Amino acid sequence: MCQKIIIFNIFILFFVACKEKNDNFVFSNGKQQTVLSLIKTNDSVYDLKADVFCADSLVSSDKWRIHYPVYHFECEDINNDGVPEIAVGVIKHTRYDSISRKRLFIFKLYEGKYIRPLWLGSRVSYPLVDFRIVGKSGDKYFRTIEQNGENSFVVAEYRLDAFGLKWLRYVQENIDSKTAKKLFNK
């Protein structure tokens, strides 16, 4: 009975969080459940957290501190290995770009429970506006909106590769923001 209540509460937490803030994701793998969360400490410090449950017990917990403002957070099994990857959109400058811009960080769950960086991307083809994970199971990829001019945008697609993102195609180039948002959300 206790196990059912805890699992039910986790799913309620997942439903409410995804509906309102989209800052918790739950993944099940047989008897094991992983809850991935993004917890805001202040405007520029977030904790990425992985809690692994087996039956009604917390088996492990891991945390990775992100010292940048976060604008987007998604989790999906992108590389089809049965373990979700964690995509976090941060705002930061880099050694080669002194302007604080939107960047994409990708983390993996090493051994299914430890959060480790997979790619701490400095940029994509053009300055990033937004990203999302799209595709069907077994064929997931990133779709982005990027700004390639003052009022000009592209919608692009990238696949997670052995090292970072591999450009697949431009869905459409040199478009206005309204058209870009429509294509981005398709």
Image: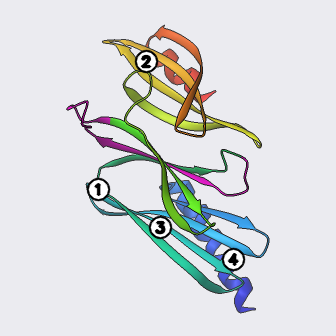
Residue stretch rendered in magenta on the structure: 80-101
Give the CA separation, mark 1 to mark 4.
33 Å
> Which quarter of the picture shows residue 150?
top left
Mark 1 belongs to which amino acid?
A: His
Q: Quadrant of the N terminus?
A: bottom right
Q: Which residue is mark 3?
A: 49
Give the CA separation, mark 2 to mark 4.
41 Å
Q: Secondary structure at mark 4?
A: helix
* 102 lies above or below 48: above
Mark 4 belongs to which amino acid?
A: Phe
Residue at 40% across, 29% down: 129
Q: Which residue is mark 4?
A: 8
Give the CA separation, mark 2 to mark 3.
34 Å
Q: Which of marks 3 and 2 precedes in the sequence?
A: 3
Residue at 52% across, 38% down: 164
Q: Which residue is mark 1?
A: 67
- Tell whether 108 sits left or right of 11: left
